[in-house]
Image (tube, rainbow, N blue to C red):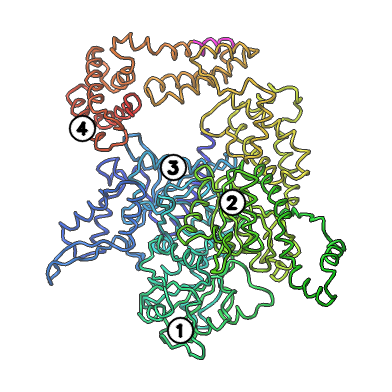
Amino acid sequence: MSEAQAYNEETLVENRMINQLQKLGYDYIHGTGLNRERTSNTEVVLKNRLTESVKRLNPWISENNLNKVVRNITHMDAASLMEANQHFHELLVNKLSIQQDLGGGRKNQTVTLIDFDNIDNNDFVITNQLGLLHASGTIYPDIMVYVNGLPLVVIECKSPELPPDMQLGEGIRQLLRYQDINEKLFHYNQFLISTSNDRAKIGTIAAQARHYSTWKEPYPLSVEEVGDNASAQDILTTGILDKERLFDIIQNFIVYEPEDGRVIKKMARYQQYRAVNKAVDRIQTGEHPQSRGGIVWATQGSGKSLAMVFLSMKLRRIEALKNPVIVVVTDRQDLDRQITATFKRSGFPNPQQAESVEQLKSLLQQGPGTTVMTLVQKFQTNEDEEYPLLTEAENVIVLVDESHRTQYSSLALNMRTGLPNATYIGFTGTPIDKEDKSTIRTFGSYIDKYSIEKAVEDGATVPIFYEARLVDLHVQGESIDTLFDRFFREYSDENKERIKQKYVTEQALTESHKRIRSIVLDMIEHYEKHIEPNGFKAQVVTVSRKAAVTYKKFLDELSDYESAVIISPKHNDEPEMQQYALSSAEEKEMIERFKKPLEDDPLAFIIVCDKLITGFDAPIEQVMYLDKPLKEHNLLQAIARTNRTYEHKTHGLIVDYYGVSRFLEKALGIFHDDDVKGAMFHVDEEIPRLQSRHRRVMQFFDGISRNDLEGHIRVLEPEDRRNTFDTAFKKFSESMDTIMPSPQAKPFIDDLKWLGKVRKHAKSRYYIDDGTMDISDTGGKVRELIEEYVYATSPRILFEPVSILSNQFDEKLDAIKGPEAKAAEMEHAIKHEIRVKFDENPVKYTSLRERLELLIEQRKERHLEFEDLFEMYQEMREELTNLNQESQSYGLKDTKHLPFYQLLEAHAPEDIEQEKIKDLTELITDIIQDNAVIDWTEKDDVKRNMRSQLKRQLRASTIPNKQVESVARELVQLGEIHYNIR
């Protein structure tokens, strides 16, 4: 980072946030000031502050128990960072217990770590540049938020001078690096922030950049109330670090959800936080049940189910509601299972799924604290039977999913008869019809809206594109009537008309085998070219169960893709249909398989009729092949299956074989324009953006002839320029990925190929293995196009960059003309070698890196000619090549001993004899080899024992005592590289 960037980071970002936090009531102490409160730089918890806070919040606690509590917090035993973090969050929110006699015998007493109800009863401190020492080095997080001595928030600031697309990514990468280096700090972390003032995002531990989100509204404040010209950082700081909101988020808006064998920490997005708190406000202030209810519209894919979990968690904590009964109602079995699973996975206490009509009645009469999950169908009665009154309690909250569908039937009437004083909150993934007065009348007005366009803008969902690929049956208009008349010539006109009305239906034509075969051939080609290369999967929606089976047969016959039919079986099914019937367990297994990455599970297509069109969440699905006449809400819900976010997924796609566009206009027409703006785009709407992105990336090479490849590569030599070009290229390739195979992409294909070639050559010349020049993040079909062209026209970059230590490197240098290009190739090759080998011998490669940086600086200041620079690089190359001989010059028995020797030499007193360091090296390597069992690098107990023996040996040597701990850890790390046994 340049001095200017460092200045801007501190002045424009770090200091600005510190000043804002001070205005919010936090005490600011610089890291050097907090050091005086710590007994060691390794301490991440401020023990004195924690001790005083526990004493203040729990005045009854004995000295012995106080020490126990502090030790339990500062020495958590867990198998992983996520496990420790989840355990601490549980202690923080639900408190911990300890045995103590308060006069009535020895009993479990509850210990409070934070007083969530009385904010001012807590100690809030912010600090910056506090050094935290660990075996791998010292980290200096830019800002940390301590509450009662516990480090709850870590903030990384980046200069707004960096390219916009790099700013937050750099901060997030640094936060991930900190989690690797100093895991203990993040045992206590509630959330993380990466900010450059103009941009700011929030995430949780282990989250990658794509999972961080913006906080666009400081609810309950407006953006204007934050201040004039409030930046993204100002809004986020006010929105989540205001003391009251910080506590609200920690208590009610964080869950830990198991997914695919691992636990993921999830925190509410700003729209979920806003919707939940608006709902809570209405429930608490409404004068009667009707005025307490309302509708929450959260666009499909934006986290509606989790919003219901967050709302339920918060309602449980509100004292005035007296531990309410919460009832979650859906109208479909798959939705019931999905929402129940979400509540259970999120750790919500004891949600009970009603298995029968009678059990539902029983559950609803259990009283406060009950959580019931049910289908609306379970509110049924026998004919002429009246539904009974179950409870007149007012602290019953009913959350109804997809509230527009079934809430005006006799079942909904029964629900309101049984629970007359309940509050009803309707959740919907689609907006309310303009003409729909029933939903408003039944639930009340909108509580909160999160529109389709807003969800796409925020990155909560991806945009959906539409493409029509209609099939010509070649039997249309008058011709089918002529054929019909010939075939049924013996029937009267009246009977022929009856036959037509019953059997010559649109469904019958849609089920035609010839038609479906034609579609499947087109579908396979489309999937092969445009979906599979990106690693995504497909859903086929058919007009009937019979058509679904026909699709499956032709897919099996005409391709090697694995597919599954998921349809509801019927008792009177013919044998042909029965063979495709799945049990509930088999269906569940198929769905889980479909959700896995294509590389992990080859199930590429699911074929459905009515199932999995709504409430089905599979982010891996990019395309829906639609061959069914869906309308209104059902159409909007169906197409939303493709809008979930996933790595490298830039858009969802609807390929229409039926012609639903005529229904789409009607579907969108029944809603208010603002509500459905951005619901679906035609592929052609991406063209203007493609043209703009094309011009932006081509501008890098204005004035340079297409024949001058070397000139193009030289343009990309500065690292910041390469990064900016890389960002522009990704945007251009994203647009191309969306447009292809439309003919409108054709004028840009040659430039895409050429830019890909330049990018590949730049990678070869200036190769950096940190991912910034890797095309793996561009769309798959774009990547294939680039790879094919580059490999065909430029064979010399088919191989990976040649090692600087191999003989082939000389051949590569000979092929390069001019001392400047040769020196550049050598410089980047040495950089690459140092990066790759650094961990093998940190002492040696640090020395080489410093020498290389000095030479680069001298070249920039024009103190060296390129010929002289090239000679010096050659000397460094020879030194790298001759490391084996260097170990012999020290008289070491094994070349593996050299990095251990040099590490010990670096820490030993200057006057120590070389022979003593050599003897110590042999003792140290003997200890490592003696402990190096199979897979020892994965076994913490082996490493602990090894460290213990090494420390004993080091203390008996001349290595200074204060360095023994860190040197022992570095020696173990070297051992992991040089003596790893598998």
Three-letter residue code for mark 2: Phe
Who comes first in sequence, dot 4 or dot 1?
Answer: 1
Q: What type of secondary structure mainly makes up the magenta span? A: helix
Who comes first in sequence, dot 4 or dot 2?
Answer: 2
Give the labeled residue for mark 2: 605
Three-letter residue code for mark 1: Leu
Q: CA distance from mark 4 to mark 2?
A: 55 Å
Who comes first in sequence, dot 4 or dot 3?
Answer: 3
Q: CA distance from mark 4 to mark 1?
A: 66 Å
Give the magenta part as a residue range: 866-874
Vertical comparison of 754 with 18: above or below: above
Can see residue 426? yes
Can see residue 198? no
Give the labeled residue for mark 4: 948
> Relative to residue 478, is residue 599 drawn left or right?
left
Q: For label 4, count other residues whose C-alpha is less than 10 Å away and answer few (under 14), some (14-19) or many (20+).
A: some
Who comes first in sequence, dot 1 or dot 2?
Answer: 1
Q: For label 1, count other residues whose C-alpha is less than 10 Å away and answer few (under 14), some (14-19) or many (20+).
A: many
Task: Tell how many labels.
Answer: 4
Give the labeled residue for mark 1: 419
> SS class of the residue under badge 4?
helix
The mark closer to the camera, 3 or 1, is 1
> SS class of the residue under badge 1?
loop
Q: CA distance from mark 3 to mark 1?
A: 49 Å
> Relative to residue 328, is residue 604 drawn left or right?
right
Give the labeled residue for mark 3: 176
Vertical comparison of 909 with 445: above or below: above
- Of 711 and 425, which appears nearest the observer? 425
